[in-house]
Structure formats: structure tokens, C-alpha cells
Amino acid sequence: MMDVLQILLSESFWAASLRIATPLIFGVLGALLCEKSGVLNLGIEGIFVAGAMAGWMAVWLGAGLWGGVLVAAGAGAFFGLIHAILTVPLGLSQHVSGLGVTLFATSVSYFIYRTALPNVTSPPRIEPFRPLDIPVLSDLPFLGPVLFQQTALTLLALILVALVWYMLNRTALGVAIQAVGDNPDSVDAQGLSVYGLRIGAVMAGSALMALGGAFLTMSAFDAFFFGMVNGRGWICIALVIFASWRPGKALLGALLFGAFDALQVRLQTEVGALVPGQVFLMAPYILSIIALVIAARKADYPRALLTPWFKGQR
Amino acid sequence: MTSPRVLSLNALSKRFGSVVANDAVSLDLHRGEVLALLGENGAGKTTLMNMLFGHYMPDSGGIDVYENGQPQPLTLGHPQAALAAGIGMVHQHFALAENLTALDNISLGSEPLFALRRSRDRVRAKVQGIMDRSGLNAPLNVPVGHLSVGERQRVEILKALYHDARILVLDEPTAVLTPQEADALFDNIGAMTRDGLSVIFISHKLREVLAFSHRIAVLRHGVKVGEMVTADADERAIARMMVGADTPVTAREPMRPGAPVLTLADVTVTARSARDSLQNANLTVHAHEVLGIAGVSGNGQSALAGVISGLLRPTGGSISVDGRTIAHPDPLAMIGAGVGRIPEDRHHDGIVGSMSVAENMVIERLDDPQVQRHGLLNRDAIAQNGQALSQSYDVRGPGIESPARLLSGGNIQKLILARVFEQSPRLILANQPTRGLDMGAAAEVGRRLLAARARGAGVLLISEDLDEILGLADRIVVIHDGKLVEVATRDREEIGLKMAGEPA
């Protein structure tokens, strides 16, 4: 018991939690943006893979790190556009299209990787984002190691939480996105384009999701592996519901999951002899399900989520 | 009318497939005028207005909006062009985002999308000015989802006025209002027309049309069949023009009520919102009696109907049918006890749209040996039953084997009536049975309900249409905020006050 307390009070535990949470923060913000406009994007898992691959490959081909980030976002927006065209003007099933995009984006990414590197056995490495060293801030007790010795992408994720919140709640664009996710007729009647808003939101959201993938190959690791996304996208879909479509709670949910994950790694080394390791691997997911069950009962779904809207049909 | 013209529709036509919704309809509107567009359901009123507002593209014809007395052709098929020309439309189904405040709904689309800041104060000042001038008041800072229907409607009108509408189109504006709210709305409209606004309102309520419009245009089967100055109009003539024939007036013969068929004793339903709850409801419906429940929608009607149909378990009180207390009121027990149900949302709760007309007619008696044996359906018997009922209840459509969702609203209702009345129920729960039906179909429903009453059934009629209740009910109970109060009077004014919750 003392050991657990010691873990919870350590800087390295919280730094690890935030690190693990970073791709989830990107992903959950992206999913939130799509769903706020009324479109569920189950392409997220594949878009993570595409972002991871595209960002890494751009850097490996000689682009700068931030260039890689831009390429990853562009790849995400591209797959978001495919999903948006299928589900918004064409009004196809968001579930089917999203799963299709996941399969498509995943296999295209693997295909490009294999075609570019046919004879490679160990994945080539790049020089990833380094942990920051900001004068004064990085030396603060506790906050320094937890917040300011992370990589720039983690800080970007935190900044994006605030930006997305501000955009949704304080700008005309955000109000319009919230309206189109609640009742598209309200937007149409005021002369705004339902299709334009939804396609834009899905593309922007997908770009954010791809940044979550890029974090994996450009910050957490330094190479691209098959299967490295490992369900993180699906976790984000659950976290959006947990967050009841609020950016602040989305951050909280991602951190909670990160903390569970960081805790299970540490517990495994503490009491690994007594309990099989798989139990610890399961723990974050089980705890997430429990948290979700509790939170989702009060979840405030965007009313028009999953409902296609067609121009001229009232 | 001596005031200048502001709008003219010139020979607008629109067909959907083989159905002609509008056939060369022309219409003029003058400054400061209130024009009532009358017609039965399906007469083409809403289609015409949707063409005006750019939701539909006309097949032929054109629209002119007058600027300083000069006609300017309106770009067709673009709501944005209609908005820019000063045309505002309030739909029957409000186009409001419920998660946003009234202020955000009003300003939606009027600010640049990609600006970093918003100018809410300017918006608020302008809306406040409009509210002061027109008398239309609504809370601006509460999410629209929390507002009453009347408040939402005012937000919709404010939205149009905020966009400097000179021509306002209201699609059945009073369908969801109490008589007092409706009168207040028309007062506000009067104030606005004195400021130069021109109004077209769609209605099928003759009373308000005669009371509040300057001019009346009547549509039937997509054709304009008449136009008159309201001052010269009389009710019978308009009704004949709408229907194309005299409507048979349903005569309610006095009857001596029999034994109680439904008794609610202190039935209470606790729900999250007051709208879905009932407080100590006491109610008795006798045989040979129609009991009317009058009230504005969202005052506990759905809870009352839910309890009687067995879909909602009351938190307190008891229900008895035919003198027997129902211990576990669930849908099966209530059907078994002899309750026939005509649900409020006939498309959603009344039929299974993907199943055939014939199947829908037997769906409440699947354990009947005539319908099934050893768990297998007797298709022949189901088809025969469907054929016979379709004939006697005049259900028209593509055939008894086609999916029920293909039927029109009126025919879906006839299907439900056939299913319910064939079981000779002791009690008929009729929840908004004529909503959305045209005069002919509504009269048919009324006639069937009175026939059931003559047969000895009790009828509980829940309706928002006070005229319907006054026409059919032997006794009237007003529902407000989940509380039931019986009224002895048959005075519209007094019942209206009770519906609004005032201690008259």
C-alpha cells in the first residue's frame, strides 16, 4: 500500500502519465470535433496509423520534425475528407464508412511502408522530438519534470485543448459547429452550409487524430512498427463519451487513462510475482469501462450525431 | 388594399414524382398586410412557402420581391437569396439548435465565421430593440432546449426580424400554443405589421384566420381555388372552398353514461421534468362517455397516456379497468384488460413501418389462435383479415402486402383505428388522434370514436385542439403541469385560462 502511495507521489509517474496520455489527447480532441458537428469518425484508428507513418516517413525522407507534423496532419485531413464525403453529402452509414476508412488507412500505410522499404528487417530510426529544457520552467519542483521536460508535441496537445475549447465556445465558427451537430436545419435556415461545416470539422478533427499517431513515431518512439497504434483510437472514441463532449473533461479522461497505464507498469514490477502480468495489462481498460459506464449515463450526446442531413428535405 | 405590393408569386408549379403539389399558383402580398393561406393537409401550402423561401426549386414560375416599388426577380432555390431579399420563415418544426442559447441561435450565420472574437453585445442590443418594439419576449441566455414551445416560436420570429425580414412566413404558428398565447402572438403580429411588416400565415383553423387576417387565399389539391378579403368572408363558404364539398358535421347524441371503465386513483408519475410527470391524478371514464383531456402539449399528457397504455409504470396510485385493479400495468396487461390505444406519434409508435399493412393489423393479437398456431403465423388468415379491414375502414395505399410506412398519415391512422376498434375495446385511449389529418380524415376519426361510445366503450380523448374536444367530449378535464382539473364550463376563454395554468 505504501508502495502505491509512493508511486502516486513521484514525479516520474505523473510525467509518464502525461506522456502516455498525449496521443489520446490529440485523438480525443479530434473525435470530439467530428462528433460535435454530428459525424462519428471510426476512421480514427486507421488515421492514427496513417499519421504515425506519414509523419515518420516525411522526417526519414529529410523533412524537418515540424514538417513531419504537418505532413501527418495533412494525411489525417485527407482520410477525413474521404470519410466526410461518404457520410455528409452522400449520407452513408457513419459506422460502415468509418470502419472502412480505418481498414483503408491502415493498409495503405503498411503498403507504402513496405513498398518504400522492401528489404528492411529492423525499422529505420529517425531523430525524434527531444524533451524540452526551458530555462526556469523546467527546473520548477514537480511541475518542471511533469510538464516542461516533455517534448514539444505534449505541450502542443495541452495548448490545443484550450484552443479547441475557445473555438467551440467563444467563436462564431464554434457556435455554428455546435448548432450543426444539434439541428442542421438551424444552420441551413440561417444561410450557412451544413455540408461545409461538417466536412470542415471532420477534416480538422481527423488532422488532430493523425497528430496523435505522429506523436508515437516522432516523440514516444523513433520508428514506425506495424500494430503500434494498438487500439488507442478506439480508446479515444470511448473517452469522448466519458468527457460528455467537453474538451476539459476530455483532457481529464485522457490523463486518467494515462495514469492507469503508468500505474499498471509500475505495479507489475512491484507485485509481478504474485499476479500474472496480463491482469495489469487489462487494468486500464477495465477501469476505463467502469468510468465510462458511470459517466455515460449522463452523457450529453449531440442530438444530430449519426443522422445524415440532405439539402432540400425538410 | 391600397398599400404598395411587396411580393408576387407568379404561376409557381412544383411536382414530386407524379404528384402535383402546386399548379400555377399566383399570389400577391402588400405592405403591412396579414395574408392567411388556408387549405387542408396536402393542399400544397407548405410546398408553396418552401419555394418562396428557397428550400424547393419550382418547376416553373417565378417570384418578384419589390424594392421601392420596383419588382426584382428573386433567385430561386436559395434560402440565402430569400434571406437577403428580406423574407423570413418560421417552420412548424423549429429550426433551432437546442444546445445553444436564443442569442446564439439568432446570431448564427450573421457574424464572420473565422473571426477570433464575437460581438455578442451588439447582437444583444439589436435583439433587445426588436423585442421592445414588437412585444415578443424570450429569455436570451438560456439554452433553447429549456424554453417552452411558445418561447421557442418567439425566438424563431425574432431570428427572422433580426435578419431585417420585411416579409414573414409562419407555418401553422398556433398549432402548439394555448388560445391565450395564440392571441398574444397575433397581437404582436398586429404591432409589427403597423411597422410595415407583411405576414403570410398558414393555417387550417378558420376561427383565427377570420379573426386576424386581412385577406385569405385558399388552396386545394395544389390549386388556388379562391381569394377574398376577410371582412367579406364567411366561415361556411371558406370551409366549402377548402374541402370542395360541405363537411358532414359530426353530431354527438346525448347518452347516459354507464359503469366506470377506467379509474385512476391518485396516480403519480415522478419524472425528471415536470412536463413528463403526473401528480395525484384522479380520473374516471364511464361507458358511453367521451372524456376530453385539454391542454397544451408537454403538460403531462404523455405521462397520462403512458400510464394508461402500460408503457409507463406509475410511482404511486392504482389503475382499474372495468372495476378490476390492474396489479402490474404493462402493455400486455392493459391490452388484455380491454384498452385500445391510438398513440400520439402514429408513425413511430403506431405501426412497424417495415412490416406489411396486413401484419400491422394483427400485431396486437399475435397469440390469437386465428393468427398463429403452434408459433407459426397463419398467413392466409392474416391476409384475409387485412383485406377485410382495409375495405371496411377504407385504408388506401399500395396494397395490404406492402410496407405500412408507404401509407399516407391519414391511412396509417385508419389502419390503427381498424386494429383497435376490431378488438371492441372497453376503453379507447385516443392521443392526438387527428393531429396532421385533413378535415375529411379527422371527421372520420371523430365519427368512429362516437360510434365506439354508442357501442358502450369509454373514450379518453387527449387533444391540443380545443375545438375537437368541445365537439366530441361529454366531460372536459384540463391538464396543466401534470395536474388534472375537471371543468364544468364549455367556454373557450375559461378553458384556455385553465390550460395556461391560471386560477380562473
Image (cartoon, coloured by chain):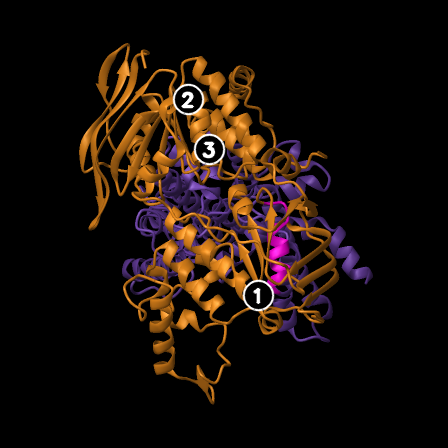
Kind of residue at badge 1: Gly
Does B299 appear in magenta?
yes
State the quadrant of the N terminus of chain A.
bottom right
On the image, the x and y values in percent for residue A57 come to: 36, 51
Residue where numbered disc 3 is placed: B207
Residue B420: image tag: none
Mark 3 residue type: Arg
**Callout 2–callout 1 Cβ contact below 8 Å:** no
Find numbered disc 1 in the image and state the secondary structure of the residue it sits on. loop
- Is residue B198 shown above or below B363? above
Q: Colour of chain B?
A: orange
Q: Quadrant for residue B111, please give it.
A: top left
- Crowd class of label 2 (few under 14; some 14 to 19; many from 20; radius 10 Å): some
**Residue at (71, 60) in percent of width and height:** B264
Residue drawn where x is 44% and y is 81% of the image:
B371
- Residue named by callout 2: B163
Figure check: B481 above or below B35: below
Q: Nearer the viewer, residue B25 or B237?
A: B237
**Horizontal arrangement in the rendering, residue B169 relative to residue B309 (left or right):** left
Q: Main secondary structure of the magenta part?
A: helix
Q: Nearer the viewer, mark 3 or mark 2?
A: 3
Query: Distance of mark 3 from mark 2, alpha carbons?
Result: 31 Å
Q: Colour of chain A?
A: purple
Question: Circle 3 marks a residue in which chain?
Answer: B
